[in-house]
Image: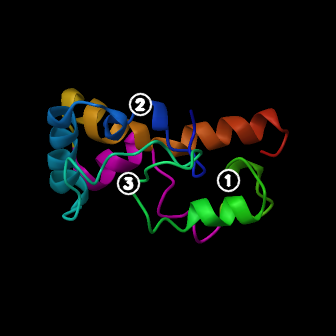
Amino acid sequence: MLGRCGYRCDLCAARSDDPEVRQRLVEGWRKYLGHQNYTAENVRCDGCMNDGRLADKNCPVRPCAIAKNIENCAFCDEFPCEKLKDFICSRERFEKRLGKIPEKDYNLCLRQFESEPELVKLRKAMGEE
């Protein structure tokens, strides 16, 4: 399941029913991304393709994609735009910025943010890239 920005929501521990898993996620986000406002309770997320709980209530990408009536940013004529620039990630970009990340931490806290390969793959399938 891809989010509007290309994040792999299906891999995200924010969807977990286990508060301990969500707490480890929050701790990893604090360590690697500097996110200080998330807790095991408020990080619960159903993914932005749903109308349920959202971890990032201030995301600029979701309302934009909905307004344009597109599934995600790969289908946008303005790809990549200013709203998306901070969301396009890959492991290579993370490690360039953060240094080597232990596999366990990466899989729990960051893997779901690998939007760049997902969006590029969709655009290639559409003949856009």
Q: Which of the numbered marks, if any, corresponds to residue 96?
A: none
Quadrant assignment, res 120: top right
**In front: 80, or 3?**
3
Amino acid carrying label 2: it is Leu
Q: Which residue is under mark 3?
A: 55
Quadrant assignment, res 23: top left
Q: Earlier in the sequence, mark 2 or mark 3?
A: 2
Closest to the camera, between mark 2 and mark 3, is: 3
Q: Earlier in the sequence, mark 1 or mark 2?
A: 2
Segment colored magenta: 81-99
**In front: 86, or 72?**
72
* Residue 79 in sight here: no
- Image spot of residue 15 (x, y percent): 37, 36
Q: Is residue 108 magenta?
A: no
Determine whether the residue tagged by mark 2 lies in a helix, strand or loop. helix
Amino acid carrying label 1: it is Cys
- Image spot of residue 38 (x, y percent): 23, 58
Q: Earlier in the sequence, mark 3 or mark 1?
A: 3
Q: Which residue is under mark 2?
A: 11
Q: Which residue is under mark 1?
A: 73
Give above or below for 6 relative to 62: above
